[in-house]
Image (cartoon, helix red, strand yellow):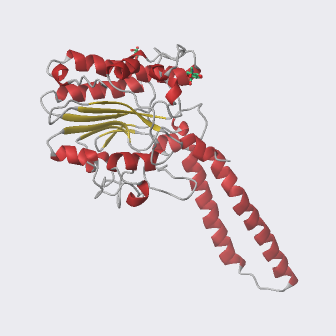
């Protein structure tokens, strides 16, 4: 039990906030899913190598107490962006599935919600969300983009509208199939027993069953089932894609050098905006399942693919740090953040 829930549980950790005490500091938020506090060197891990995150911690502050609004991606991200309990924006579910599973579903963070990205955009910030969104996409049609990051105060989006699903990467198993198979057993049993009972009462003469109408009904059910099963077997093709702004740029999503691509996008955004205050939210796909790492990191850590993924993310943090210290002007904006 809880397979579905367990696999999509995310604990969103903000690794670092870089600010400066001037009125319009540049802001970079790095977010990771499912990363344990004990997995980082700055929180005491001695076997996973996270030198870049550790350096940020050394130069800044480390916090040891935080309560997320929810242990799930969608509601906790809604709370993170708006500062409101997810139930207030309609982003808290009471069913087992509390997150958006399908990019084609019509729900999402209501466009009238006030996100910090909207507020900063109003103040003249260049804003970007790179990586995972997971707060919905469209309302009525497949291109109104009412829940899309660009409708929530971000000028630029490069990433995944939903989340990183196991089903998106071959060989990593499925979040859905087991649940669907399990969920179908009872309805099929009930339908079977009902049919047999109807045939029996019909032949005994207790009831005149309209078999033709029943036949159509069964045909519709069967077609729906076939469509459903087709969808789940083609989940990767249909639901896993990468977008730039409103355009799909890779479908299905490829995991090859994915973190490198996200990092490059983040760095280019910073380079494009050295003259303006900017907000960059880099929402990693690491270290949520499906776990992945590029060739440079695969098999390099002491903790399997999970460790490789953490170390790759740390590399990405290092690249941003390097860029920030290299770009003149931004250097001046870097905070000293000493916790005195
Ligand atoms: C470091 O992280 C790994 C991977 O999560 C974990 O197995 C190990 O116990 C951690 N070490 C410490 C000292 O917390
Ligand atoms: C991924 O990165 C590696 C190492 O930098 C490179 O050799 C390879 O060509 C890249 N693959 C793609 C598809 O860009």
Residue 81 image position (x, y, % from top left): 34, 46
Answer left or right for 329 relative to 263: left
102 vs 329: above or below:
below
Regarding residue 43, the answer to whether it shows in the image is yes
How many callouts does the rendering have? Answer: 0
Residue 302: percent from left, percent from top: 57, 15
**Quadrant of the snapshot with the C terminus:** top left
Seen as rendered, the residue at the extreme front is: 340
Determine the quadrant in which ligand 2 lies: top left
Between 188 and 115, the one lying in front of the other is 115
Extreme-left residue of the structure? 275
Residue positioned 22% across, 42% down in the render: 155
Q: Residue furthest right?
A: 204
| Above or below, 324 relative to 199 | above
* Residue 191 in picture, x, y percent from top left: 73, 67
The answer to whether residue 264 is above or below residue 97 is above
Say whether residue 176 is visible: no
**199 and 183: which is toward the camera:** 183
Residue that appears at 71% across and 81% down: 210
User: In the visual, does 90 lie left or right of 1?
Assistant: left
- Residue drawn at (34%, 50%) of the image: 83
* Residue 3 position by quadrant: top right
Residue 82 on image: x %, y %: 33, 50
Observer-nearest of 60 and 7: 60
Q: Which is more toward the observer, 140 or 83?
A: 83
């Amino acid at each position: 039990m809880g397979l579905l829930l367990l696999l999509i549980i995310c604990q969103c950790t903000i690794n670092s906030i870089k600010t400066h005490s001037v009125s319009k500091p540049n802001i970079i938020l790095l977010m990771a899913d499912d990363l344990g506090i004990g997995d980082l060197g700055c929180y005491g891990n001695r076997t996973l190598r996270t030198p870049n995150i550790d350096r940020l911690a050394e130069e800044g502050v480390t916090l040891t107490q935080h309560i997320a609004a929810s242990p799930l991606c969608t509601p906790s991200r809604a709370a993170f962006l708006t500062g409101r309990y997810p139930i207030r924006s309609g982003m808290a579910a009471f069913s087992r599935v509390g997150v958006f599973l399908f990019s084609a579903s019509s729900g999402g963070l209501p466009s009238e919600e006030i996100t910090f990205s909207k507020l900063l955009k109003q103040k003249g910030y260049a804003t970007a969300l790179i990586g995972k969104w997971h707060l919905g996409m469209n309302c009525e049609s497949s291109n109104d983009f009412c829940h899309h990051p660009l409708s929530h105060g971000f000028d630029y989006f490069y990433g995944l509208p939903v989340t990183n699903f196991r089903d998106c990467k071959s060989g990593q198993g499925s979040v859905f199939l087991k649940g669907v198979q399990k969920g179908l057993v009872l309805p099929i049993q009930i339908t079977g027993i009902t049919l047999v009972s109807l045939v029996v009462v019909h032949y005994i003469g207790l009831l005149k069953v309209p078999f033709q109408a029943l036949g159509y009904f069964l045909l519709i059910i069967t077609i729906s089932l076939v469509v459903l099963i087709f969808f789940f077997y083609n989940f990767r093709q249909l639901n896993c894609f990468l977008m730039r702004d409103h355009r799909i740029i890779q479908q299905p999503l490829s995991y090859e050098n994915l973190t490198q691509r996200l990092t490059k996008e983040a760095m280019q955004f910073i380079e494009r905006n050295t003259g303006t205050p900017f907000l960059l939210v880099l929402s990693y796909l690491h270290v949520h399942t499906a776990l992945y790492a590029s060739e440079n990191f695969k098999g390099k850590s002491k903790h399997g693919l999970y460790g490789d993924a953490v170390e790759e993310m740390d590399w990405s943090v290092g690249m941003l740090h390097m860029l920030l210290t290299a770009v003149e002007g931004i250097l001046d904006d870097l905070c000293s953040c000493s916790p005195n």
